Amino acid sequence: MAGMSLDAMLADLPTHCAVGCKRNAQGYTETWIGHKPHLNVADGKEREGL
């Protein structure tokens, strides 16, 4: 997030304990407790020749 300080980014993270579930490819239900983070990481450089 351009323009945000590290402290602001850390304060924006969820702190509650979430419970999630989904059905996998074999039909079984998988559950988890806690936040499931999704990271978007880029170095800001364009790649050529891909």
Image: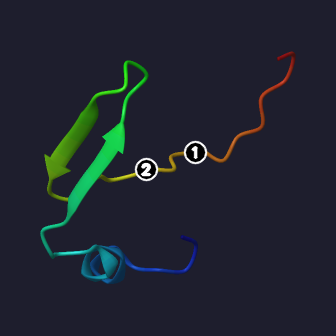
Q: Is residue 48 above or below residue 5?
A: above
Image coordinates of residue 25 in percent, x first then y, are 43, 22
Q: Residue at x 70, y 40 (%)?
A: 45
Image coordinates of residue 13 in percent, x first then y, are 29, 73
Q: Are marks 1 and 2 in contact (CB under 8 Å)?
A: no
Q: Residue at x 87, y 16 (%)?
A: 49
| Circle number at residue 15 | none
In this rendering, would 10 be left or right of 19? right
Mark 2 closeness class: few <14, some 14–19, many ≥20 residues within 10 Å: few
| Circle number at residue 39 | 2
Q: Secondary structure at mark 1?
A: loop
Q: Quadrant of residue 33?
A: bottom left
Instruction: Name the image quarter holding the C terminus.
Output: top right
Mark 1 closeness class: few <14, some 14–19, many ≥20 residues within 10 Å: few
**Which is more toward the observer, 48 or 32?**
32
Numbered circles on residues, count = 2
Q: Is residue 50 above or below residue 24?
A: above
Residue, disc 1? 42
The label nearer to you, 1 versus 2, is 2
Instruction: Name the image quarter holding the N terminus.
Output: bottom right
Three-letter amino acid code at the position of disc 1: Ala
Three-letter amino acid code at the position of disc 2: Leu
Q: Residue at x 85, y 23 (%)?
A: 48
Q: Residue at x 34, y 83 (%)?
A: 8
The residue most toward the right is 49
Q: Is residue 38 above or below residue 5?
A: above
Image coordinates of residue 5 in percent, x first then y, are 39, 79
Q: Quadrant of residue 9?
A: bottom left
**Which is more toward the observer, 47 or 32?**
32
Q: Secondary structure at mark 2?
A: loop
**Which is more toward the observer, 22 or 35?**
22
